[in-house]
Image (cartoon, rainbow, N blue to C red):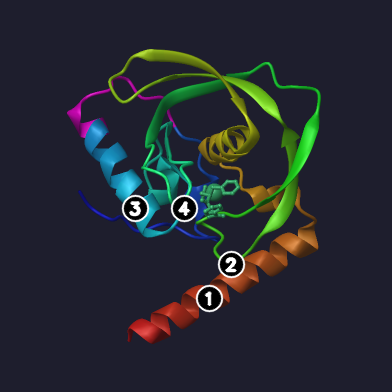
Amino acid sequence: MAVLEIRTVPDPVLKEVSQPVDQVDDDLRQLMDDMLQTMYAADGIGLAAIQVGVAKRVIVMDLAGPDEEAQPRYFVNPVLSDPSDTLKPYEEGCLSVPTVYDEVERPDRIRIRYLDYDGNPQDEIAEGMFAVCIQHEMDHLEGVLFIDYLSRLKRQRAVQKVKKVEKSKGRDAA
Ligand code: K1U
Ligand code: ZN
C-alpha cells in the first residue's frame, strides 16, 4: 500500500469531473487501498480519487472515532437521491484546502446507491456526519469544493492561505 500525494488548491485537477468506473477489479481495489492509507496518513475522514489526481468516481471514508476500531468504507460510482428538505449547517474541512474550515448547509438526510469494495450494489440512507461527508465527497467527483459555496472573497482568501501553507511546507522540506 502507498501514501499518495494529495492535490491542493489551486491545482486544476480538482476542477475535473470524474468518470464512471467500468469494473471493480484488483487494480481499482489497489487504488482504494492506497486512497485509504493516504486518508489515514492525513487524518481525514473521507477522500475522493480526484484528490490524488485520479479522475474516477471513487470515494473512501472512515467515520470511526479516535477510540473506535477502523470502519473503512468504499463507494464506487455513487449516486445520491431523495435529499431531505431540511438543511443542516456543518463546519467543513477538506484535505485539498488544508487549514481552512467554514460552514456549509446541506440536506441532513440523503439516499446513496453505489458499488462496494467487491463490486456489489448497495443502497443506504445517509444521516448525520455520513450525510455531510458523502455530499462533500460527491462534490469532488463533480469538480466542486466546499469553498465554492463561500463568498468570492472568502474563497480567494482560502486559496491564498493554502498557497502560503504549501510554500512554507516546501521550505521546511528543503
Ligand atoms: O474531502 C476531504 O478532503 C476529506 C474531508 C472530509 C470532510 C470533513 C469534514 C466535513 C466534510 C467533509 C476531511 O476529512 S478534512 C479533515 C477534517 O476536517 C476532519 C478530520 C477528522 C474529523 C473531523 C474532521
Ligand atoms: Zn474535500
Identify the amino acid type marked 3. Answer: Thr
Residue range in magenta is 19-28
Q: Against 22, is 71 above or below?
A: below
Q: Which mark is residue 99?
A: 2
In 3D space, how far apart are the residues under numbered discs 1 and 2 (Cα atoms)? 8 Å
Q: Which of the two labelled residues, at mark 3 and mark 1, occupies the earlier sequence position? A: 3
Where is residue 12 shown, x and y percent of the image? Answer: 51, 54
**Front tag of 4 and 1:** 4
Identify the amino acid type marked 4. Answer: Gly
Q: Is residue 104 left or right of residue 137?
A: right
Query: Dot 1 corresponds to which residue?
Result: 165
Query: Dot 4 corresponds to which residue?
Result: 44
Where is residue 54 shown, x and y percent of the image? Answer: 37, 43
Identify the amino acid type marked 2. Answer: Thr
Q: Is mark 4 within 8 Å of ligand 1?
A: yes
Crowd class of label 1 (few under 14; some 14 to 19; many from 20; radius 10 Å): some
Q: Which of the two labelled residues, at mark 4 and mark 2, occupies the earlier sequence position? A: 4
Does 26 appear in magenta?
yes
Q: Which of the two labelled residues, at mark 3 and mark 4, occupies the earlier sequence position? A: 3
In 3D space, how far apart are the residues under numbered discs 4 and 1 (Cα atoms)? 18 Å
